[in-house]
Amino acid sequence: MSAGNESIGSIGKPRGFRDILFAEAARREKIVSQVSAYFASAGYELVETPSVEYPETLQKGQGYACTSNANNNSGNLRDTFRFVDVDGNLIALRNDVTGSLARVVATRFSLVEPPYRLRYVADVFQEQESLRGSDRQLTQLGLECFGLSSEAADQEVLKLALGGAASIGLDDVKLHINDVSIMNCLLAKALEAPDSAADLSWKQEFLNEWKKGNLVRVKKLARAISEGGVLPAPLSQTIKKLLALRGGIEALDAAASLVAGDTSAAKAIEGLRASYKAVLADIDKGSNLVVDFSLAPQLDYYSGLIFELNAVQGNGRSCRIGSGGRYDRLMEQFGRKMPAAGFGYDLASLERAVASYEDSAAPQSETPPLRVAVPKGKLYDDCIDLLAQAGIDMPELRNPGRLLRVANDQYDIIISKPTDVAIYVSRGVADIGISGLDTLVEADFPLLQLLDLGFGGCEFVVAAPDDMTCSLDELSLRLGTIRVATKYPRLTAQFFDERGIQVEIVKLNGNIELAPLIGIADLVVDITQTGTTLRENNLRIVGRVLPSTARFTANYSAARTDARVAQLADTLETILSSNQAKDEQEEMSTS
């Protein structure tokens, strides 16, 4: 039995797939029944599609034309299970339902007049790396509306997204909305420059980092392309200000002021305003509807409205239960131009939210303490100093000894290994955390990077023995495969893959500098602050991979639903700016 399987004796199942028993299965069955009945009452008809599709269909379903360059795109099929059937055809398990329904509408509904209101309950299969604890089989239930005018469909879909959650007793659901076309309009302005067409990689990187939640990198990119002359400075400032806007009508008014003069962006904001007002008139708790211009599209095919649903659980914390949006361009991939919008719930998330109330005799009525994960080791003292400046000053944190948790009525501080902070934040165990960029990149868990805190500076480097005088390319040509020792296999593989250098990665847990000395590796990839340890072990830097500093991170749901996260981020940003100004003033006075 392979290490990737969970086994009992000789009987097991592949990782990422699970058995669902009794109470959980009963809750899931009830949820599916109630949500399906609610969707049906709104006129949505059930459609079932095969679990397998041709890869070309899935590729189109992600919003990408089937070209020779498609595999270089973020819309490729790395996360799909693919196999060859007995006829020699390459087929794949579907990783998304929307593309399959778009295929059905384009190929089967030509004799039926739109609009088409379709609902579904379906399993999707998404490949995941080992040891991430993620499911590879997910059950989704949702709906898609094809052929209805954009404004009417957007409002209908948003109301049904909240109504479906309410139908199973989830009344406290926060709905965050945005329109991706606003940001696209702003970025398109940069493309109007005569010399901008030569290199569009900055735009793709910007969109990728936004989608990943790396707001630190997004802001730095906006500044860098502005300084490089690609993006006018006022437009760069507009983008950064827009990403900071969140609220209700006041946020929409501020956004309209920012994009004044851009007709397309202004039109998109007015459409968002109409949706906001229509939904607001339909719900009891206005604070549960938020316009959030930092909300990024999680799928590449979205072209207009995007939204996310977060349910407050019995313990007072939130979890993401679904998302959706508008994807007009997707239908064009299947040869039928038509407006379309929809959303999907993750059944497992719905079940956990419902179970949190059933399992809690007295659901949380008060706001729970804000939970913060801080790393042990070299970043710890700077973290505690910064938090103290922000008003989070607990005496026990100064000398915690063996304590792993310090809490009061307002804050719950978890003291963890640096590599665990990203796990805690991404899984919602912690609302926010502080972690080095090095561990965030290596872990690659979904979370928001809100601030670069500036301390804990170090750098990922490639180091070789002093007596190695050739370049990396020359070494690759001579050896064919270079052996590289590192604690960071993901980042190392990415670095060498981008350069077309073939490597064998030797994963070590400590004393990386020893590897070339004892012959287990030709090179090392490690972090360094001054380079002293490398020099003492007769190693020299031959490549620079990535600079790293501490980052202030947040769980997606916590950042969307808990105002304290944004308030703390604002406080920290003010403190950092003040500290920087003081440092600069001191440097000037001593020079």
Image (cartoon, helix red, strand yellow):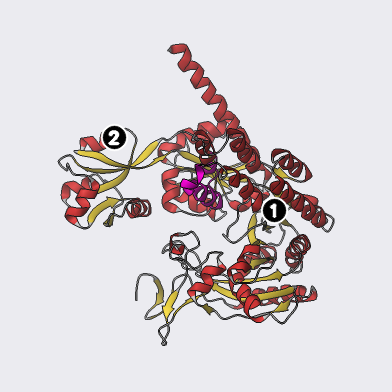
Q: Which secondary structure type mostly characterizes the magenta part of the structure?
A: helix
Q: Is residue 127 left or right of residue 450?
A: left
Is 64 located above or below residue 475 in the figure?
A: below
Is 349 located above or below residue 120 in the figure?
A: above
- Residue 255 pos. (x, y %): 71, 42
- The quarter in which the N terminus is drawn is bottom left
Residue at numbered disc 2: 531
Query: Disc 2 or 1, which lies upstream in sequence?
Result: 1
Residue 278 placement: quadrant = bottom right
Specify the amino acid type for callout 2: Gly
Residue at numbered disc 1: 176
**Disc 1 residue crowd, few under 14, some 14–19, many 20+, Cα 10 Å:** many
Q: Is residue 63 left or right of residue 526?
A: right
Quick one: 537 or 152, which is closer to the camera? 152
**Disc 2 residue crowd, few under 14, some 14–19, many 20+, Cα 10 Å:** some
Residue 63 placement: quadrant = bottom right
Could you tell me which secondary element the residue under label 2 belongs to?
Answer: loop
What residue is at 59 percent from the left and 72 percent from the top? 334
Quick one: 8 or 558, which is closer to the camera? 558
Query: Over which residues does the magenta segment extend?
Result: 195-219
